[in-house]
Amino acid sequence: MPIVTVQLLEGRTDEQKRALVEKVTDAVSETTGAPKERVSIIISEMKPNDYGVAGKRPSDQHEQ
């Protein structure tokens, strides 16, 4: 049973998350052969202050 965790910065709509779950499920099922009903998707949302790239948080770059 494949389990996929997708981490995103918060702010996506329910419709966007629904589409993401559908498309990731399709991709996992197609590539692994697992039945769609056995594929689980976990969406984990983060606040911009909880994420950084190249030593900077996106939230800090708006303050400069």
Image (cartoon, rainbow, N blue to C red):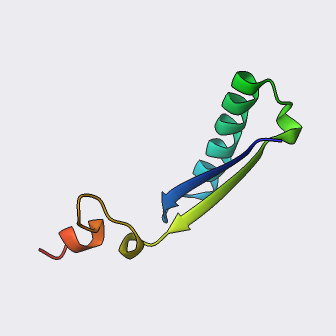
Name the spot of residue 54 as percent of width and height, x first. Answer: 23, 58
Compared across the picture, whether 37 is left or right of 31 comes to: right
- In front: 34, or 24? 34
Give residue 43's quadrant in the image.
bottom right
Residue at 28% across / 65% down in the picture?
A: 58
Residue at 55% across / 65% down in the picture?
A: 45
Compared across the picture, whether 27 is left or right of 61 comes to: right
Name the spot of residue 18 as percent of width and height, x first. Answer: 67, 48
Say above or below: 9 vs 30: below
Say above or below: 19 vs 63: above
Compared across the picture, whether 54 is left or right of 11 comes to: left
What is the total number of numbered labels drawn onto the structure image? 0
Residue at 28% across / 68% down in the picture?
A: 57
Say above or below: 32 vs 42: above
Compared across the picture, whether 43 is left or right of 29 comes to: left
Residue at 37% across / 75% down in the picture?
A: 49
Name the spot of residue 6 as percent of width and height, x first. Answer: 58, 52
- In front: 40, or 13? 40
Name the spot of residue 16 as percent of width and height, x first. Answer: 58, 49
- In front: 27, or 54? 54
Most extreme residue toward the left is 64
- In front: 13, or 21? 21
Quadrant containing the C terminus is bottom left
